Amino acid sequence: MREADKPIGIFDSGIGGLTVFKEIRKALPQERLIYLGDTARFPYGTKSPATVVRYALENTAFLLKHQVKMLVVACNTASAYSLEMIQERFPLPAIGVVDPGAKAAVAVSKGKIGIIGTEGTISSQAYPKAIRRLNPSLAVLSQACPLLVSLVEEGWLDNEIATKVTEHYLADLRKGNIDTLVLGCTHYPLLKATFRKVVGEGVRIIDSAEATSGEVVSLLEENGLRRMEGEGESHIYVTYLPQRFERVGRLFLHEDLPPVHQVDLV
Amino acid sequence: MREADKPIGIFDSGIGGLTVFKEIRKALPQERLIYLGDTARFPYGTKSPATVVRYALENTAFLLKHQVKMLVVACNTASAYSLEMIQERFPLPAIGVVDPGAKAAVAVSKGKIGIIGTEGTISSQAYPKAIRRLNPSLAVLSQACPLLVSLVEEGWLDNEIATKVTEHYLADLRKGNIDTLVLGCTHYPLLKATFRKVVGEGVRIIDSAEATSGEVVSLLEENGLRRMEGEGESHIYVTYLPQRFERVGRLFLHEDLPPVHQVDLV
């Protein structure tokens, strides 16, 4: 098989990475995609860094068996803790979701960036560190939003409860006058309309999933790996409860998923 | 050490079991208690039954090393999947939270019982099965409430959001005219005031934690293991993030926790 015809591997701790999968599929309709959702060990956000690294290496090994040409770590916690180790250990281009999101925020912010994410992502400080590396003069405010993942998986995306919960979490960031809001969790793009309503039109909203798909395009082109012809295809694997994944996944893709297969990693 | 002076071991997938710990401590102030919260592997509700059994056996082995005289599985999912195996494998009295909750509900219901819990507990059908064994003529309605655990851990126990979310989840049970509501998740007793407001005074609310502590008293007495003198003491171990456990644990106990120690089980 030609290198360019090989698939792109994407993994996440569960279902959230489908927002990244969706953007990559939109930007690169001719690519073959393999998505692995490690639903048996979800969530990663409350695991120790050493455990997250071990899971991430196992996920990567699974995708490598499927001959992937490139790897996307579509999980904020796994990106924060394991991307460097993956890049060191495996001989293929690999990117996460944190750096693309940080880069996109730095490109538009005039002074103060707000970051929202799970408790794990916020306490890792991955976004503030990435932003500081790019532009140390920007201020960063962070807010963990533990309830939002369950809210999305419940399908409550723009009802009264979603609005109330979002208003609560964003209160301090709004008082802090952020000009840019980074959605630092792969579940959050589904709440974008609610975030927009709560922060108003004056705040730029950065969707890490979109930012990441742009970086995937660049990285493929830099490495001469972009597939320019043929039809795209998608395969989805999960480590537990494929039926639940198919059901909740429809919220993320706005359409039926390709068949979801269960695999054992360990 | 005399058998009666040995501690009671309690384990949960995380912090929710503190509601059971609290009731046991209240009912049995002279007992020594050891609590293990397996926070590194929380939640169990989305893990496969085989995985939950493995975790439960590892937790039990840890508590046995601390010479416990009795075991309380203070987690609904672990009770549903692993209690029988624990009772077969280990030579000590062991109880879970499902049977006491079911028994208490059957004792008061005139016809229709509502069960709420996590997705894992509801899909295990553990409560309907236990209720049917006790009284096959009672009807059971079940409702998974995925958001409530995060709501409790966030400390939103009786605000507007808690009320709206609870109203939503209980709508079908109320339409179904349940006369008894079983709180089938160890987190839910913290929302009791909100449940009461939503279901009104006509519905009996069964708190599995309270029901379990009553059964613990009986089981100790039956086995001649109740400690009748001396001062009680408590030790708490978790497998990850002891500081978070101390902080959120205050919501559960309404007071500071004894020092929380981190341990590695595997």
Image (tube, coloured by chain):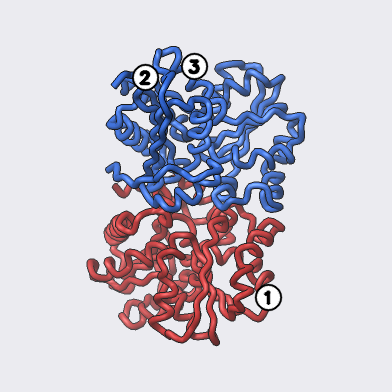
Chain colours: A red, B blue
Amino acid type, residue under disc 1 in the picture: Gly
Subunit that carries the residue with mark 2: B
For label 3, the SS is helix
Q: Residue at x 58, y 78 (%)?
A: A178
Quadrant in which the N terminus of chain B appears: top left
Q: Look at the image and tell me whether residue B76 can be seen.
A: no
In the displayed structure, A48 sits above or below B187; it is below
- Judging by the rendered image, the residue that carries numbered circle 2 is B4
Which part of the image, by quadrant, shows the C terminus of chain B? top left
**Mark 1 residue element:** loop
Marked residue chain, label 3: B
Point 27% across, 31% down: residue? B65
Where is B28 relative to A92, above or below?
Answer: above
Q: Earlier in the sequence, mark 2 or mark 3?
A: 2
Amino acid type, callout 3:
Ser
Quarter assignment of residue A123 = bottom left
Q: Nearer the viewer, mark 2 or mark 1?
A: 2
Q: Which mark is residue A200?
A: 1
Q: Are marks 2 and 1 on the same chain?
A: no
Dot 2 amino acid type: Ala
Up the image or down, A104 lies above or below B253; here it is below
Query: Are the residues flagged by discs 1 and 3 from a single subunit?
Result: no
Residue A200, percent across and down? 68, 75
Residue for badge 3: B218
Mark 1–mark 3 Cα distance, whole angstroms, equals: 59 Å
Q: Say which residue appears at 45% left-offset and 48% top-offset.
A: B245
Q: Is residue A197 visible?
A: yes
- Mark 3, Cα crowd under 10 Å, few <14 / some 14-19 / many 20+, is few
Which numbered disc covers residue B234? none
- Cβ–Cβ below 8 Å for labels 1 and 3? no
Q: Are marks 2 and 3 on the same chain?
A: yes
For mark 2, does the 10 Å Cα neighbourhood hold few (<14), some (14 to 19), or many (20 or more) residues?
many
